Image (cartoon, rainbow, N blue to C red):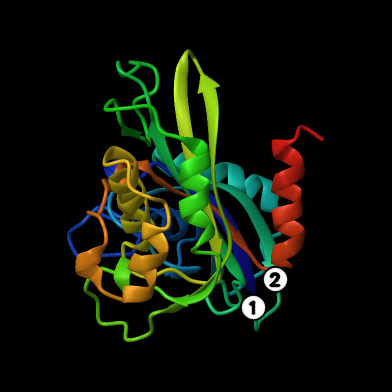
Amino acid sequence: MRYIICFEYLGKNFYGSQKQPDKRTVQGEIEKALCTLTKDEIKITPSGRTDAKVSAEHQVAHFDINKKIENPSNFLYKLNCILPEDVKVFELNETTANFHAQKDAKYKHYRYIIQNNRVASVFCSECNLFYPYKELNIERLNKALSYLVGHHDFSAFKSNSDNPYNDCKIYFARASKELIKRQNFIFIDVIGDRFLYNMIRTIVGQLLLIERNELNPNIMEEVLKSKDRTKAGQVVDACGLVLKYVGYDNVENYIKKINLQKEGK
């Protein structure tokens, strides 16, 4: 039997999501809990991996088990009793034998969170980058992000890796601002079919470089077209990056949905 799980985790406590020898990882904790509960060797296949300190609100994986889970709700309850507080599985569903959490994923939604105030809040210290230097301009941020939408070679925003493929299709890239507990938060939301190593964090680094030096937002397009990593800004801290959602449906419907949520409809 094959099952899908959807789960969330606080990245700051992990050496990334992918299982590593002698390291505390998200995959390691979930597999350990599943093995304890089922008394069997269970391996999960996530939709992808996230780096150390990167969090997730909606990650997806599948696993195989020798027998049907008769009471999924009870199974889920027991599983979360075993899991530590910084990783929780919130959904469990039976699926077809040919479903693959990684290969079947059509898009991913990442969000980078910036706390943009002169003084950091003691209540808003998790999962964000504190940026006190100046007030970020949403209009300028969105102008710069607009150049990234479409199918492009993102070599300029990729840290060194063994992956030779540099093309990605970005469906949506937008900055927004929200006041939470007297603090201004900037959300950088990017939805794409795939992402390169440190791509989102480098894009945000370039946005902050443009803003801090009051450069023309079209610099983003020039950097993109250069395909030269040395032209882009620094990689910002992983603590502000969150995997919001992994989608297996129509991306246009998903974008429409989040736009309606933003408008309060």
Judged from the image, the secondary structure of the residue bearing numbered disc 1 is loop
Mark number, residue 95: 2
Is the C terminus in the top left, top right, bottom left or bottom right quadrant? Answer: top right
Name the spot of residue 244 as percent of width and height, x first.
54, 49
Q: Nearer the viewer, mark 2 or mark 1?
A: 1
Which residue sits at x=64%, y=75%? Answer: 1
Name the spot of residue 259 as percent of width and height, x first.
72, 45
| Residue 113 shows in this picture | yes
Of residues 150 and 65, the one nearer the viewer is 150
Residue, disc 1 = 99
Label 2: how many residues lie within 10 Å, few (<14), some (14-19) or many (20+)?
some
Label 1: how many residues lie within 10 Å, few (<14), some (14-19) or many (20+)?
some
The reply to whether dot 2 and dot 1 touch (C-beta < 8 Å) is yes
Which residue sits at x=51%, y=50%? Answer: 143
Judged from the image, the secondary structure of the residue bearing numbered disc 2 is strand
Q: Amino acid at mark 2?
A: Thr
Name the spot of residue 54 as percent of width and height, x first.
35, 49
Residue 238 as seen in the image, left or right of residue 181: left
